[in-house]
């Protein structure tokens, strides 16, 4: 989130504990980043154990992403008001407690509510991480410190599927999926205790205010759009579903009008009105939403396909998905060497590689019979992973390079929120395609193998289409006039999507 809004007094000499404090920040950040990838592997086990419906399985992912998205901007500002370190420790404690609730959930409804709490706690913690690091380290050490955030993000993307598969397959104490959440408890407790003693206290600014009406309008508007997309199929698309979507659009329009009125009187705004009226930023926010909408839903479908349709174990499923994460890690390391050069070309290349990789995967899955050869999925997943790793940092830099420096921090935080909203919308849309076609195929008497393969291949068309749209829109970005702002944020966010 924004670091230029807090303007704290930096100590005359660097804090001697800064590298230990960085380790705590990295551990907490890793715990948050690994969450989505580790949960994807466990979805089939949750579905069976808790007797979850199709839409409820979607909500296990979407509830976390949506809560995280809606909490990023307000909790970023709250960190300015109350103090970054305080909010960080509260966030880690809340994430740990919510993980315990998830692991002990007696039913799917309880789990979904716990996931909402977990997402809000993650949103409370995440905006403070880079801000604390920025203030704690002198300028000549920040590059080295921020590079460790990129490394931890890459490791999280690689370790998530494997660790999830190991924990679920181990069936510790007769618990299949619960350990993926419970493992956070000792890590979180240790991070809170160590952070209390090692992370420097950063004072807040009580004079700053949050835009609570804006928070309500934006949150309710997004929820009113996403909820009927997830639940509409379950209820046969009744009139209230379409009315709710229309109401969501109205609430978002009211949010824009409210933000404009706040800007006129110089009052705090959830999303700077200057950004809303910046055409290049809003175009970039739309592209970011589309770009981010494909991956979370895609891996939900792949996990259900492999485990539910073809009896892969959770570990086999996690290992099958690993080439994608390896591709992200490789491409992120390579992309960092380009700096702010060739941004439009990198984004276009990213879209092309993702279309090729996921299109390849679509055609393979569409043609499978009674078995899936996981080695056949390795090349397309690796290509797609390289595409994602190549494109995300370029996209953030492209958008923020055309944002005035005074709005760069707010723009970076807003882009992260749009990214998460895109992920939630993608889960809803891809889930709608997948579960509708799976139900229709099973009702028509198709064998499970064929039904799952057909539903998965059709759902992947949305993913292919979303990245094809990114490819087509990439030339319409303005050529960056100056080095991109918001360094560090994109690298941290890639792993959330994989």
Image (cartoon, rainbow, N blue to C red):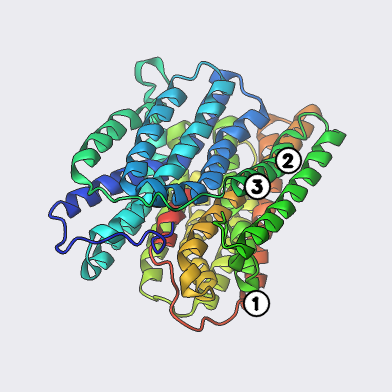
Q: Nearer the viewer, residue 480 or 371?
A: 480
Residue bearing the label numbered 1: 476
Q: Report, in whole angstroms, how far the alpha carbon at label 3 lies from the one at label 1.
A: 24 Å
Instruction: State yes or no: discs 3 and 2 in contact (Cβ < 8 Å).
Output: yes
Compute the Cα span from label 1 to label 2. Answer: 30 Å
Q: At numbered mark 2, what does the secondary structure look like: helix, strand or loop? A: helix
Q: Is residue 157 shown to the viewer in this render? A: no
- Residue that carries the numbered disc 2 in the rendered image: 229
Q: Earlier in the sequence, mark 3 or mark 1?
A: 3
Quadrant where the image shows the N terminus: bottom left
Quarter of the figure with residue 371: top right
In space, the residues marked 3 and 2 are separated at their CA atoms by 8 Å
In contact (CB < 8 Å): disc 1 and disc 2: no
In what element is the residue under mark 1?
helix
Identify the residue under disc 3: 425
Nearer to the camera, 153 or 278: 278
For the point 70% across and 37% down, the residue is 227
State if disc 1 and disc 3 touch (CB < 8 Å). no
Q: Position of residue 189 (x, y in %)?
A: 28, 31
Q: Judge by depth and name the residue closer to the eye, 489 or 35.
A: 489
């Amino acid at each position: 989130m924004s670091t230029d809004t807090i303007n704290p007094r930096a100590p005359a000499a660097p804090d001697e504990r800064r590298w230990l404090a960085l380790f705590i920040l990295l551990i907490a950040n890793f715990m948050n980043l690994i969450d989505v990838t580790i949960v994807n592997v466990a979805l089939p086990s949750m579905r069976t154990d808790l007797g979850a419906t199709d839409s409820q399985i979607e909500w296990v992912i979407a509830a976390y992403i949506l809560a995280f998205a809606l909490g990023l901007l307000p909790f970023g500002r709250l960190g300015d008001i109350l103090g970054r370190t305080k909010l960080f420790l509260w966030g880690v404690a809340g994430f740990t407690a919510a993980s315990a609730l998830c692991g002990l959930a007696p039913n799917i409804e309880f789990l979904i509510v716990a996931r909402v709490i977990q997402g809000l706690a993650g949103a409370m913690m995440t905006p403070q991480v880079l801000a604390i690091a920025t203030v704690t380290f002198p300028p000549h050490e920040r590059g080295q410190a921020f590079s460790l955030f990129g490394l931890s993000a890459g490791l999280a993307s690689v370790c998530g599927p494997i660790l999830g598969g190991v924990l679920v397959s181990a069936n510790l104490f007769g618990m299949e999926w619960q350990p993926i959440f419970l493992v956070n408890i000792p890590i979180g407790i240790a991070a809170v205790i160590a952070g209390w003693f090692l992370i420097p206290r950063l004072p807040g600014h009580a004079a700053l205010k949050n835009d609570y009406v804006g928070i309500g309008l934006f949150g309710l508007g997004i929820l009113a759009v996403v909820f009927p997309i997830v639940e509409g199929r379950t209820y046969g698309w009744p009139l209230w579903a379409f009315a709710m979507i229309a109401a969501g659009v109205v609430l978002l329009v009211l949010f824009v009008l409210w933000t404009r009125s706040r800007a006129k009187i110089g009052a705090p705004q959830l999303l700077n009105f200057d950004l809303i009226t910046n055409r290049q930023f809003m175009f970039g926010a739309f592209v970011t939403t589309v770009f981010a909408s494909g991956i979370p839903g895609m891996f939900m479908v792949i996990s259900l396909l492999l485990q539910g349709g073809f009896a892969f174990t959770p570990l086999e499923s996690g290992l099958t998905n690993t080439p994608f994460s390896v591709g992200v890690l490789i491409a992120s390391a390579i992309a960092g060497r380009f700096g702010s050069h060739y941004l439009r070309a990198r984004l276009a290349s990213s879209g092309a590689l993702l279309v090729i990789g996921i299109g390849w995967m679509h055609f393979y899955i569409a043609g499978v019979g009674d078995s899936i050869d996981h080695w056949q999925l390795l090349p397309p997943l690796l290509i797609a992973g390289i595409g994602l790793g190549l494109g995300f940092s370029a996209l953030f830099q492209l958008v923020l390079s055309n944002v005035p420096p005074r709005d760069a921090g707010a723009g970076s935080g807003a882009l992260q929120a749009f990214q998460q909203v895109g992920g939630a919308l993608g889960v809803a849309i891809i889930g709608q395609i997948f579960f509708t076609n799976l139900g229709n195929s099973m009702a028509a008497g198709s064998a499970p193998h064929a039904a799952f393969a057909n539903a998965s291949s059709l759902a992947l068309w949305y993913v292919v289409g979303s990245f094809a749209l990114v490819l087509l829109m990439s030339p319409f970005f303005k050529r960056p006039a100056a080095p991109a702002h918001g360094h560090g944020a994109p690298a941290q966010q890639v792993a959330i999507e994989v």
